[in-house]
Amino acid sequence: MRSFSKPAIDVPSQLELLKRRGLHIQNEARAESFLQAVSFFRLSPYMRPFQQPEDRDHRFRNGSQFRQLTRLYDFDRRLRLLSMDAIERVEVASRAVISNHMGPVYGSHWYINPQMFHPAFDHQRLLTTLSIKQSNATRDYQRECERIDQLHADDNRKATLKRHRAKESYARHYPATYSHPPLMPGWAMLEELTLGDLSHLYKGLARDSDKKAIAKRLGLAAPLMQSWLHTLTTVRNMCAHHSRMWNRELGIRPELPKKANFPWPAHLFLPGPHTRIFAVLCILNHLMHQVSPNARWGQRLCQLVHEFPEVNLKAMGFPPDWHQDAFWHAPRT
């Protein structure tokens, strides 16, 4: 262990440092604007493939250019946006398929019954989370009503404003309208959960038959859906915090089909760790065919990669000629 001694330096000094390390900067004004908007620290991981290995001074390989760094950064940014588009749709669809199965089978407030879940599932935490959300929403609504009461308006106008405010979220509308059961129905509860909470809830369901019926609606076996929700929670958090996806090794290995009754890339049937982002992109492509086939998500991924031919796809787990696999072109029903 040693004391930290690196000084904080301004953007012009950062550019001088990069030049001393051997990076060619063709347009210094544009490079300075980029670092003002993105920051040296955030760009640092994208420098590593252009730097000499094992060089303690972080010198760049001959011919390395600042534009190469920004191109790689831009590719990664757009890959995150494309991935978030898919994850959002998959998350919404996952809420729907759970609701559309559990509600009609077990009733509007199925989740209140602890027997719906494994003993290891923290059922009380789920109920407490929903209770707090409703209480906070009610408190906020009451504060808004107090502000409305201070307006210089007639009583009819104030009543109308209060009704509108009450409908702005179901978490405030339900306790203001219904006294029993004390918590909102299942279809509304699912919309209040994070993707991580949703993943835990699905994993915690007591009956395998329910898990299988829900997963089937997304063209999956239950173990795959359980693993993939967990994996997508991790990837969603990466995207939401603008973390790097390029050359990223996942902390968890998603469960992958050993055989599949749906199109699946041949590369992922081969032995290997499959902890790079390619496996996640394949998961998203399959799920997007289930929940939003007209979005042509796989084609958009191919187009993005085509726009950045210089990007090292092997660092993300892509096999050679990956786009020629029938998985990326197969029609789905």
Image (tube, grey):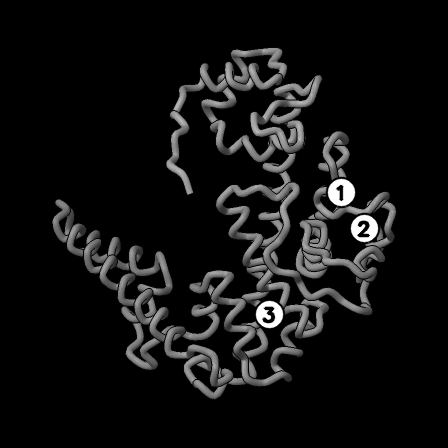
Q: Which mark is residue 87?
A: none
Q: Secondary structure at mark 2?
A: helix
Question: Which one is closest to the eye, mark 3 or mark 1?
Answer: 1
**What residue is disc 3 on?**
97
Q: Nearer the viewer, residue 5 or 11?
A: 5
| Cα–Cα span, label 3 and label 2 | 25 Å
Split into 4 quadrants, where in the image is the N terminus? top left
Q: Position of residue 18 (x, y in %)?
A: 55, 19
**What residue is disc 1 on?**
314
Residue sitting at x 64%, y 21%: 67
Contact between labelled residues 2 and 1, with CB atoms less than 8 Å apart: no
Q: Nearer the viewer, residue 190 or 58?
A: 58
Q: Nearer the viewer, residue 238 or 147?
A: 238
Q: Quadrant of residue 178?
A: bottom left
Q: Position of residue 127 (x, y in %)?
A: 37, 75
Q: Secondary structure at mark 1?
A: helix
